[in-house]
Structure formats: C-alpha cells, structure tokens
Image (cartoon, rainbow, N blue to C red):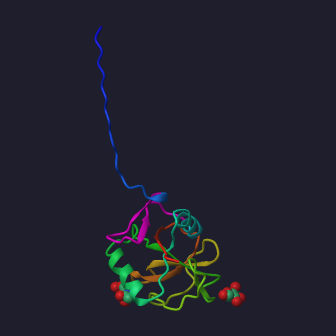
Amino acid sequence: MKCVIGVLVLAFCATAYPNDLVPLGASTSYYVSTTKKSFIGAWINCKTGGMDLASVTTAAEQAELNTTVGSATGDGEGYWLGGVAENVSGDWYWSDSARRVIYTNWGTGQPRDYGSEGKGSCIRLGNFYGTSQPLLWQAVSCEYKLYFICKYTSS
Ligand SMILES: *[C@@H]1O[C@H](CO)[C@@H](O)[C@H](O)[C@H]1NC(C)=O
Ligand SMILES: *[C@@H]1O[C@H](CO)[C@@H](O)[C@H](O)[C@H]1NC(C)=O
C-alpha cells in the first residue's frame, strides 16, 4: 500500500476593504467606490463601512482632496461628496456632522437647479454646467448614480 500525503497551503493575504471601497490615490483617509449609487445609497455604503461621505470644510481639505483625486473624473461624471440641501436655494449641510456648509468650492454659476430626476440637491465634486470643472462643486439631483468618496472621520 502506498500512501501519499500532500499538504498544500495557499495563503491569500489581501487587505479587505468594506463595501467595494478602495483607497483613493495615495490617501489613507479617503476611499472611493467601485460602484455608482444614489446619494442615499452612497451615504449608507460609507456608513456601513465605518466612514462618512466626504465633507469639505476648509480650503486645506479641498486642497488635499484636489491632490488625492488628481485627474480622476469618476468616469467623467464626478463623485458624491456629503453635502445636501432641501433645495438649491436652501441651507446646505454636511451629512457627517449635520453642520452648515460654510466653506464652499462651487463651480461657475453654482448652486443651481440641474436635472429633472427626483427632488433634493446634493453636492457632486465635478461641475459640468458649461465647461467641465472636475474639482469644483455642482448641485445635482440626489437620485443620480455616481461614484462617491468616503472619508474616515475622527470624532
Ligand atoms: C481645487 O482645484 C480646483 C480646480 O483646479 C481649483 O479651482 C480650486 O481652487 C482648488 N482648490 C484648492 C483649495 O486648492
Ligand atoms: C428650500 O429650503 C429651505 C430650507 O433650507 C426652505 O425654507 C424653503 O422653503 C425651501 N424652498 C422651497 C421652494 O421648497
């Protein structure tokens, strides 16, 4: 009788990121989605991944985001940030803190009504009214499905 004992050990060591989120650029705090979702879907996805949709409260944060996003354009459609309002002329809030949007980085002519799907207004990074301004903000319908940027927030 012949016995062959074979032991094959395969070790896969890969970092698992939650909810199809992958690091954005070289950043350790910003993550970008690999799927497109509505604003609410994006918010849930960030939350269940232990993060929040990215807020931008200072020019320094916008500058960091500029550097991190670089020339990526979210498939030419931009990315959800965490800014939301009842309507374009209403008060804007960040979803992570529920604080008012004070610092702004709106594109030309923003915010203004744009699109016909659904109600409400959410901030996308990527202004496409008129000329493309990828790193500026635009108010668009929260129903749009876009890639989105999540950020770890230290509370
Ligand atoms: C981010 O990039 C946009 C587009 O180049 C620019 O208009 C904006 O001033 C930049 N913001 C900061 C804070 O560097
Ligand atoms: C827009 O939102 C504000 C609250 O931010 C509200 O007071 C106002 O009535 C809203 N306007 C319309 C037309 O719904």
**Residue 9, position as x, y percentages in the image:** 32, 36
Question: Which of 8 and 146 lies nearest the eye of the viewer?
Answer: 8
**Residue 23, position as x, y percentages in the image:** 38, 65
Magenta part of the chain: 20-37
Question: Which of 155 and 72 lies nearest the eye of the viewer?
Answer: 155
**Residue 42, position as x, y percentages in the image:** 54, 67
Q: Residue at x 56, y 70 (%)?
A: 39
- On the picture, is 115 further left or further right than 35? right
User: Measured along the vertical axis of the image, is residue 146 above or below residue 65?
Assistant: above
Q: Quadrant of the N terminus?
A: top left
Is 31 covered by the magenta stretch?
A: yes
How many callouts does the rendering have? 0
Q: Quadrant of ligand 1?
A: bottom left
**Residue 65, position as x, y percentages in the image:** 38, 79
Is 95 covered by the magenta stretch?
A: no
- On the picture, is 43 further left or further right than 132? right
Residue 142, image quadrant: bottom right
Residue that sits furthest to the top in the current view? 1
User: Measured along the vertical axis of the image, is residue 53 above or below residue 19?
Assistant: below
Residue 69, image quadrant: bottom left
- On the picture, is 48 further left or further right than 68? right
